[in-house]
Image (cartoon, rainbow, N blue to C red):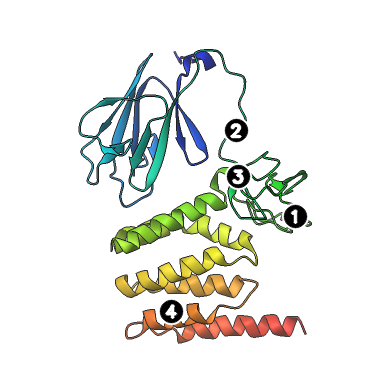
């Protein structure tokens, strides 16, 4: 028989960035494996990295023999430790905070993981915030994205969550990325790719990119004229391709730029040419890219 746990019984939570996860009694596994309760796609994280043992009145954490270890409040975790309210856990490149809730019944809480970005300073904020605490810019709570429902920043023409045009109707043939896989999450994936590249774990970085390629395709598409994410991915893929001789990484970059509303910057063009030099002929890719540009120019004349 399925057991239902009341809000009063859920005493513990785990915070990761802007998400909050309930910790129910039992074992809560953190690692790179999809079978874990919390999966972190980070080359610094082992498949089964750490475990939180949740009991009725307390919770403990232990490292599961991970390659890079786990830290608790800045100190290496060498044995099972009891967790206290506010304890900071570092696993790979990720900081988690352990929270012990009040014993009193809780009212329904606002969903977590829904983010907007301040138009003034670009800082990520929880949806529903009326004023940025960093630059004090007002958030326009009266306007919301028709595509994903997030509130809009003052004067913004595009949604900071999914990139959709705020003045246009939702696109019927293409679903917007969900709120929990918005821009901030895509940037986290790119951060992990850069860390793997810096650690020279090239095969792992390629694997992460291939697993998240569809999600990144959507986010790049909905970014519109903001090509900052595409530029970062272009530089990453150029270096990865040079190291792994994987031509599909270069083709992905050129194809994405052919769909962008602006032309590929010279620095990206040069990086791709340098990456392919001596092992891959990009001429076919360039023919398709420049042919697309010529067709677009013809269509606008």
> With respect to residue 135, does 196 lie above or below?
below
Q: Nearer the viewer, mark 1 or mark 3?
A: 3
| Whole-number angstrom distance, CA of label 1 to CA of label 4 | 34 Å
Q: Is residue 285 left or right of residue 62?
A: right
The image's mark for residue 111 is 2
> With respect to residue 246, does 67 lie above or below?
above
What residue did someone put label 1 on? Answer: 166
Quarter in which the C terminus is drawn: bottom right
Query: Which tag, 4 or 2, sits closer to the chain's start?
Result: 2
Query: Which tag, 3 or 2, sits closer to the chain's start?
Result: 2
Residue 49 appears anywhere in the view = no
Q: Residues within 10 Å of mark 2 (few under 14, many from 20)?
A: few
| Whole-number angstrom distance, CA of label 1 to CA of label 3 | 19 Å
Residue at 67 percent of width and 55 percent of height: 119
| Whole-number angstrom distance, CA of label 4 to CA of label 2 | 42 Å
Depth order, front residue of 285/66: 66
């Amino acid at each position: 028989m399925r057991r239902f746990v009341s809000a009063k019984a859920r005493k513990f939570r785990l915070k990761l960035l802007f998400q909050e996860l309930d910790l129910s009694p039992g074992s809560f596994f953190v690692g790179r494996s999809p079978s874990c309760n919390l999966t972190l796609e980070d080359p610094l994280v082992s498949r089964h990295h750490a475990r939180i043992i949740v009991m009725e009145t307390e919770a403990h954490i232990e490292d599961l023999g991970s390659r890079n270890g786990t830290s608790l409040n800045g100190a290496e975790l060498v044995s099972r430790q009891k967790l206290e309210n506010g304890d900071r856990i570092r696993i790979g490149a990720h900081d988690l905070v352990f929270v012990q809730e009040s014993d009193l019944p809780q009212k329904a809480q606002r969903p977590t993981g829904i983010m907007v970005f301040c138009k003034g300073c670009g800082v990520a904020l929880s949806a529903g915030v009326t004023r940025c605490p960093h630059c004090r810019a007002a958030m326009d709570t009266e306007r919301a994205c028709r595509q994903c429902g997030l509130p809009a920043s003052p004067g913004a023409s595009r949604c900071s969550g999914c990139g959709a045009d705020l003045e246009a109707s939702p696109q019927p043939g293409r679903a917007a990325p969900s709120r929990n896989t918005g821009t901030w999450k895509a940037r986290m994936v790119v951060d992990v790719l850069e860390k793997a590249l810096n650690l020279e774990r090239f095969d792992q970085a390629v694997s992460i990119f291939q697993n998240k390629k569809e999600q990144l395709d959507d986010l790049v598409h909905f970014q519109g004229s903001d090509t900052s994410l595409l530029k970062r991915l272009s530089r990453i893929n150029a270096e990865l391709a040079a190291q792994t001789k994987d031509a599909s990484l270069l083709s992905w970059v050129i194809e994405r730029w052919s769909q962008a509303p602006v032309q590929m910057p010279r620095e990206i063009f040069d990086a791709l040419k340098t990456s392919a030099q001596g092992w891959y002929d990009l001429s076919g890719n360039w023919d398709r890219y420049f042919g697309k540009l010529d067709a677009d120019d013809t269509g606008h004349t």
